Image (cartoon, rainbow, N blue to C red):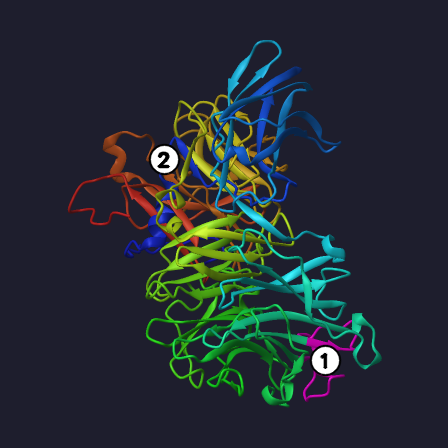
Amino acid sequence: MKDDKILFNTLQPSINGIMKRFLTLLTCSLTLQAQSSTTPLLNDGSKTTLLTFQIPTNGEKTLSSVEFSGSSHLKDITEISLAHQRKTGNRLFATRKTIANSFALKGSLDLPPGNHLFVLTISLKSSANLLHKISLQPTKYNLSDGTTKKIDHISSRPQRLAYPIHKRGDYDCHTFRIPGIARSKNGHLLAVADMRYNSRRDLQGHMDIGLRISKDSGQTWSPPRAIMDMGEHGGKSQDQNGCSDPCILVDEETGEIFVAACWTHGKPGTHQWQGNGSEPGFDIDKSTQFIVVRSTDHGATWSKPENWTKKLKDPSWHLFAPAPGNGITMKDGTLVMPTQGRDAKGLPFSNITWSKDHGKTWHVSNHARDNTTECAVAELSDGSLLLNMRDNRNRADKSGTNGRAIAHTKDLGKSWVSHSTDHSALPEPVCMASLIADPYRKGTVYFSNPNNKRSRSHMTLRRSTDDGKTWSSQILLDTKGGAYSSLVMIDENHLGILYESSVADMIFQKIPISEFNEETSEKPLIQSLFKGERFPNIVVSKEGTLIATWGNRHIRARRSTDGGSSWGPEITITNPGFQGGGTTVDETTGDILAFVEENHPPANIFIYRSSDDGLTWKKESPTIRPDSQGHHPSMHMNDHGTTLRHGKYKGRLIRPTRFYAGKNDREKWPEHYTNAIYSDDHGKTWQTSEPFPENGTGEACLVELSDGSLYYNSRVHWQERPKNTRRR
């Protein structure tokens, strides 16, 4: 790429699944497809936010009522309340205790001009059935002056119930973290976790391994109790004898249960994964220890802690520890525990540890992968093992190669091969995840993790029916939350998940297997955003706000700050005006540039700039230099462009454009061509590239690929054949 020109090569790749989805996003449409926010609802009587929505007012108004409709198990609701959310403090509008499928919340609330956010919270009956769901949505609101307006842009999926395993501060414990769950041989569910008494922080600190037991498939749980507590070992205080990162394994033949964790003795202010937080050798004052407790009565009582460090750890390694979550019993009775460590150089690795004699002796496998840590293991239908690993490389890699490291072994880890889905199928923000096989359905495995490359959010449950080669269906559990998780088969028809959520430190949810087959689990929700006129565009701002623009006479925008669940009122960018291909987000400054033409091009071009995330727009007259043929570009219905993220031109703004050959008459179409404009001063001045190497084109789009090259895709406007052989 030269400094003053951009040259294009025409490509004709096969349209794979990713590109099909990409092209779908570019298709003109009167609606926006969006998935509503998903929030677990706690079944302990506490208040949980069900949904938010916005009410716009043009002047001073008084809200008198909001009407709702709902379905599913509304009788589980004991109280519902609606509040007006403000920076200066929320104002309660109304509460109600008797809920029907259709009802109104009535009150009196003065609203100044503007856009007003309302929050609907509910309380559920204690121990409401975890298989129940709640669905509610506002349908219209009424003002005191007699005005009634429909709320037609709110869509809400039924929300799933959850049992709060721990909320911050409960049971004299600051935080529960690091879940592991398993089903004992008598059918009880055993949930283990770090009981972090004083703070959320990792070792070193005062923390024990705690246990809660459910005897009714997860509907209710016993109070938590510590099953691994090193007390004041060696004369050191509790906060210098912390235990963390539990892994639970049930021997499905004998019924014996193993819970392994790591124990740090002394070393205040250190972390076992950093520097000398854990050192080579076996000395408990220097190296974090591999500790195990056992139960032979389904978790009722537990042995004293056993130190397995010397029989498992290579003394040259800095660290050897269980990987949190759960281990497995293979079909031939072999016990397998996922493990992790730091080698002689202090570099992390993942592997497995296994036993063929019911835990009397254990063997440590070779490393499956380096620069990986927490891992999960599952047995596939052919008896081999799949290891799914957290990969530190994903901290920097947010491209198409971001994904869980996945390896496969047929000899209990003596040798490993990369799986076909390695670094491709399962995105991660670098976080622990869970993987289990379904013993009732051959070839079926389940996976859970925060399905997001950049944040621990969007806790998602996935299913594969071909031993992890593809992941055909998924269920979103928590839009705003989700970090560590652990899965368990409750019975043939239900899956359980224990995870760190947005509504409590740790929750348990129960999912019918049949939901993976329901059409509604994958069906998008459709919302009407604009009426009349043409030409859609949508971008995501630097703040994560969705900004949809529209119009060929009156250019308008609408904003969504909750991922498309609800939308604010229309904001006029300019009237009159002709949308010249939408908006471009400057990812360096955060400014959003809307390109506007006076009328159908060729026409004068203006930029309307927003520096406040799309709330207000200011007109500018940019300098756009002609191309090498002396032609000035037009914008009309070329896509929004991008900010380059790689290489020498990182930070450059670039967007596709077109040349109209004087006018849009059909006889001029053979002279039309597309190109691009680019700016290195945040949109004040723009250079125009060389033409796309084919005349008769128009309405283009482009993306930057992971190697820094540009993929440019242009519509064929002139259809004569065979002279013009290229389509897109």
Provide residue 159's location: percent of width, then percent of height: 51, 41
Q: Is 496 included in the stretch rendered in magenta?
A: no
Q: Which residue is drawn at 48% across and 46% down?
A: 131
Along the viewing direction, whichever of 108 and 226 lies nearer the viewer = 226
Relative depth, front residue between 529 and 643 = 529
Residue reaching furthest to the left = 722
- Residue name at image x 48 percent, y 79 percent: 335
Q: Residue tagged by mark 1?
A: 276
* Label placed on residue 28: 2
> Mostly what secondary structure, the magenta segment?
loop
As measured in the structure, the alpha-carbon distance from the residue carrying label 2 to the one carrying label 1 is 57 Å
Looking at the image, residue 469 lies above or below residue 684: below
How dense is the environment of label 1, judged by Cα within 10 Å: few (below 14), some, or many (20 and up)?
Answer: some
- 276 is within the stretch colored magenta: yes
Q: Would residue 711 be seen by someone viewing this image from the given angle? A: yes
* The label number, if any, that marks residue 408 in the structure image: none
Q: Give the range drawn in magenta.
A: 263-289
Secondary element under disc 1, as helix, strand or loop, is helix
- Horizontal arrangement in the rendering, residue 31 relative to residue 486 (left or right): left
From this view, report whether residue 442 is shown above or below residue 566. below
Above-or-below relation of 287 to 727? below
Work out whether residue 601 or residue 505 is closer to the camera in this orientation and state it: 505
Point out residue 426 in the picture as x, y percentages from the top left corner: 45, 61
| Three-letter code, disc 2 | Cys
Q: Where is residue 440 in the image (x, y as percent from the top left)?
A: 36, 63
